[in-house]
Amino acid sequence: MPESKKRKHRGRTVHADTEIRPSWNDDIKPAPSWWAPVMLTLMVVGLVWVVVTHLANGLYPIPGIGDWNQAIGFGVMIVGFLMTLRWR
């Protein structure tokens, strides 16, 4: 019975003179030390704002603006979540 032919390894070979390119995020500086606490605080404050607005039927935390209280709470949370994009 005939033997099958051996396949040649077609993997990528790296030569010693090959230059390795830096990653796209190597030049991004780490966030300052206050970044993470502010980010988490904004997310929690926004969540508390929305919960208080929901429990108070739109009367609190700012009376007179109704459902815009929820928009403010969600806006604060979104700012906190957008801060996570730069956190490193």
Image: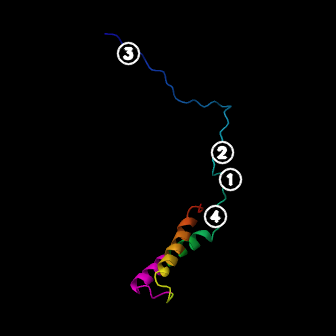
Q: Which residue is outermost to the top? A: 1
Q: Secondary structure at mark 3?
A: loop
Mark 2 — residue?
22
Amino acid on which the number 1 mark rests in the picture: Asp
Q: Residue at x 47, y 78 (%)?
A: 70
* Magenta residues, start to end: 46-61
**The C terminus sits in image quarter:** bottom right
Q: Residue at x 39, y 84 (%)?
A: 55
Q: Report x, y in % for residue 4.
A: 38, 15
Dot 3 surroundings within 10 Å: few (below 14), some, or many (20 or more)? few
Dot 4 surroundings within 10 Å: few (below 14), some, or many (20 or more)? few
Mark 4 — residue?
31
Mark 1 — residue?
27
Q: Is residue 82 left or right of residue 67?
A: right
Q: Calculate the distance from the C-alpha at mark 1 to the C-alpha at mark 2.
A: 9 Å
**Image position of 7 with respect to 67: above or below:** above
Q: Which mark is residue 4?
A: 3
Query: Which quadrant of the view contains residue 12?
Result: top right
Query: Which quadrant of the view contains residue 18?
Result: top right
Determine whether label 4 and label 2 are within 8 Å by CB.
no
Q: Is residue 65 left or right of residue 1?
A: right
Q: Earlier in the sequence, mark 4 or mark 3?
A: 3
Q: Secondary structure at mark 2?
A: loop
Q: Is residue 74 left or right of residue 30?
A: left
Q: Earlier in the sequence, mark 1 or mark 2?
A: 2
